[in-house]
Structures are given as C-alpha cells and as structure tokens.
Image (spheres, helix red, strand yellow):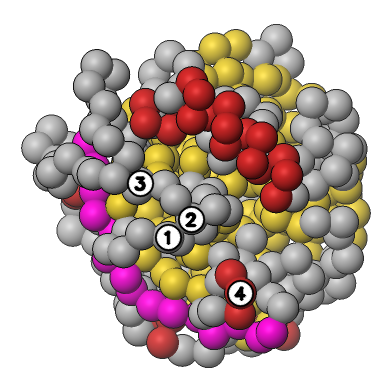
C-alpha cells in the first residue's frame, strides 16, 4: 500500500476513533499514549500438553517444482489480496482478505478462483495484513485469525487479531457475529508487521515484523494461554531474521502439522524446519530458499491443505493463484 493511501486511511481512522476502539473496550478509551494493564486470560480452557510434530521431511527444500498458475481470483472486490489461508476442512477452499481500505470482509474462493462467498465481520478494519487458520476453544472446529497488524507509520500502541469460527463456504455469503478480538502489544512501540502465523499445536500467535529500512525482521509470540477477548497480551520476542538488502517479510504461514514455517517477501520465499515448540531454536537456524514467482506485489502465502506445497497470491485485480508443488 502506498504512503498517500495509508495517510488517508489513517486520518479517517483517527476521525472515527476506530484505532482506539480496536484497542480499548467499547465504552472507555485510554489515551493513545497509554495502555491499560496487561490482562491474563482466565476463561480459556486448558489445552492438552503440546508435543513436537514429526520432523519436516529430509530434502524438502529441494523438492519444490517451479510455480504454476492454477487459478485466477474471480471476485472483483478482491483488489489488494494481502492475506490468504487454505481451509483444512473444506476441500480446495482458500480464504483471503484485502489490505487496508478493504473493510472487515473475508472472501472464500475455490482453488481455481471461483467465488465461494463474502463474509463480513462487525469490527473495525484499520490495516488488515495477514490471516491464518488455527485452533480455538472448540477442538472440533478450525478458526480464522484476521491480523489487523499493519502500522506503516509505526504509531499504534497495540495491534489487533480477530478470531472467528471458519464459516461454511457459500456463494450467498453472510455476516459473522461470533468474533473474538485480541489486542497485542510489543515490548517496545514502533513495529510494522504484515505476517502472522497461528501454531496448530499450541494455538500461539506469531507476528513477524516487515524489516523496514534494512533492519532485521523481528519475530514475536503471543502465548495462547494469555489471549483473552477484549484484553491486551504482551508479545515476547522469540527470534530475528536478517534480510538481504531491499527484502521485506510480507506474509508467513505454518504447515497443518506444525513441522515447517514459511515466510515470503515480494520476490523471495524462505522455509524453516521446526526444531522446538517455542521457536527460539527454530529461528536461530538459517532458512532455505524455495521458489517464488514474479508477482505485482506479492503479500500472501499459505501452505496447501496437505503436504508442504504452498500457494501465493499478489495484490491487483483478478490476480493469479500460484502453486509451488512439493512431492514430499
């Protein structure tokens, strides 16, 4: 998103107090320069003790084919696809959302890009940048996590992640009323993030900063046990990622088993084998590089429903859905 568009959206957001509303409770809003006390979750049911997944297959980094376009997004409203997630319970279904300015809406498409529904949330949308699928309170259902985590001007005291039960794809669409919102705060202010991961094993949320102005990308974790609807959770740093000059992190994902993690930039893709539950050892290792395709402004990536293949989508009207297949 260009700076002028961002400034326009920022002024509208401040005028409507949507930035404050996304951080505070509905009736009292703290000043932008202060934060309420960090809230510890008391209502989240205990999760089973997490265990490490089976290791990522040996040779995975060398197993990927070159990118192939498998579809074209046929939803005209999707003009700045900034986040995608692949359903794990509905075959060949992809969820996506627009960048800032697109409103609090998620869209479902088939793998070939056919419209499978438009679903609107009754929440603010300041700068949605990435989305993920992960666990929630009902172990029998998957949940969509929508990351209102962008901060180009690096002024937000906290960012927000919305969680909804994954809707049933339906071209008729609908309104989502079951929305839970978590506000997350960095140890220090001033980070812009476009990449979010939800761990399928622990339910933890990871945010990855963009790595602006040649700085390393910072990786932060919000433990699932600390997440509470309407409260604030302090993020803890679990790693850094040194980017080559001119590179940025614009999206991220974790495979359905939790064994592999992937980041993308505009023209790069990096993959890690998971080696620990807390990710500190994982991100201390060097990633491998995997194939990427030339996209106008690539800001979305997601692992496929099974295996370690992945999909990418660019911003722009009717973008291609690109598949990078793995035989692992």
Residue drawn at (43%, 33%) of the image: 19
Residue 248 in percent (x, y) is at 65, 70
Whether residue 180 appears in this view of the structure is: yes
Q: Which residue is mark 4?
A: 213
Is residue 23 or residue 291 the one in the foreground?
23
Q: Secondary structure at mark 1?
A: loop
Q: Secondary structure at mark 2?
A: loop
Q: Which mark is residue 190?
A: 1
Measure how far apart labels 3 and 4 are at the Cα level: 21 Å
Q: Which residue is mark 2?
A: 154
Report the residue that reaches farthest toward the left. Answer: 42
Residue 296 in percent (x, y) is at 87, 56
Measure how far apart labels 2 and 4 are at the Cα level: 13 Å
Residue drawn at (27%, 63%) of the image: 187
Q: Which residue is mark 3?
A: 158
Q: Residues within 10 Å of mark 2 (few under 14, many from 20)?
A: few
Marks 2,1: beta carbons within 8 A:
yes
Q: Residues within 10 Å of mark 4 (few under 14, many from 20)?
A: few
Q: Counting residues from the N terminus, which is met first, the one under dot 2 or under dot 4?
A: 2
Residue drawn at (49%, 41%) of the image: 148
176 to 242, vertically: above or below: above
Marks 2,4: beta carbons within 8 A:
no
Q: Provide the residue span drawn in magenta.
A: 231-245
Q: Is residue 306 magenta?
A: no
Using residue 75 as the reference point, say whether residue 211 is left or right of it. Answer: left
Determine the image quadrant of residue 214.
bottom right
Measure how far apart labels 3 and 2 are at the Cα level: 10 Å
Identify the main secondary structure in magenta.
Answer: strand
Q: Counting residues from the N terminus, which is met first, the one under dot 3 or under dot 4?
A: 3
């Amino acid at each position: 998103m260009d700076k002028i568009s961002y400034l326009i959206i920022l002024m509208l957001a401040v005028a409507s107090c949507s930035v404050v509303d996304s951080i505070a409770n509905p009736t009292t809003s703290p000043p932008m320069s202060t934060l309420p006390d960090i809230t510890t979750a008391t209502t989240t049911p205990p999760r089973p003790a997490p265990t490490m997944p089976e290791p990522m297959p040996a040779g995975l980094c060398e197993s990927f084919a070159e990118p192939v376009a498998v579809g074209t997004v046929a939803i005209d409203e999707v003009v700045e696809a900034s986040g995608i997630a692949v359903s794990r319970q509905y075959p060949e279904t992809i969820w996506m959302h627009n960048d800032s300015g697109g409103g609090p809406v998620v869209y479902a498409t088939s793998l070939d890009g056919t419209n499978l529904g438009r679903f609107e949330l009754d929440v603010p949308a300041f700068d949605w940048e990435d989305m993920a699928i992960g666990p929630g309170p009902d172990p029998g259902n998957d949940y969509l996590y929508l990351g209102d985590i962008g901060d180009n001007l690096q002024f937000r005291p906290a960012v927000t992640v919305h969680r909804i039960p994954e809707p049933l794809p339906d071209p008729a669409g609908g309104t989502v009323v079951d929305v839970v919102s978590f506000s997350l705060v960095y140890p220090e202010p001033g980070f812009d993030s476009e990449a979010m991961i939800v761990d399928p094993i622990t339910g933890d949320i990871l945010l990855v900063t963009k790595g602006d102005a040649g700085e390393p990308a910072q990786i932060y974790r919000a433990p699932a046990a600390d997440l509470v609807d309407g409260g604030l959770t302090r993020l803890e740093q679990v790693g850094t990622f040194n980017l080559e000059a001119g590179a940025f992190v614009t999206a991220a994902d974790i495979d359905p088993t939790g064994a592999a993690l992937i980041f993308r930039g505009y023209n790069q893709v990096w993959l890690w084998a998971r080696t620990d539950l807390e990710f500190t050892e994982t991100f201390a290792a060097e990633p491998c590089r995997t194939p990427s395709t030339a996209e106008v402004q690539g800001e979305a990536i997601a692992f496929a429903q099974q295996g370690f293949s992945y999909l990418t989508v660019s911003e722009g009207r009717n973008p291609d859905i690109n598949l990078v297949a793995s035989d692992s």
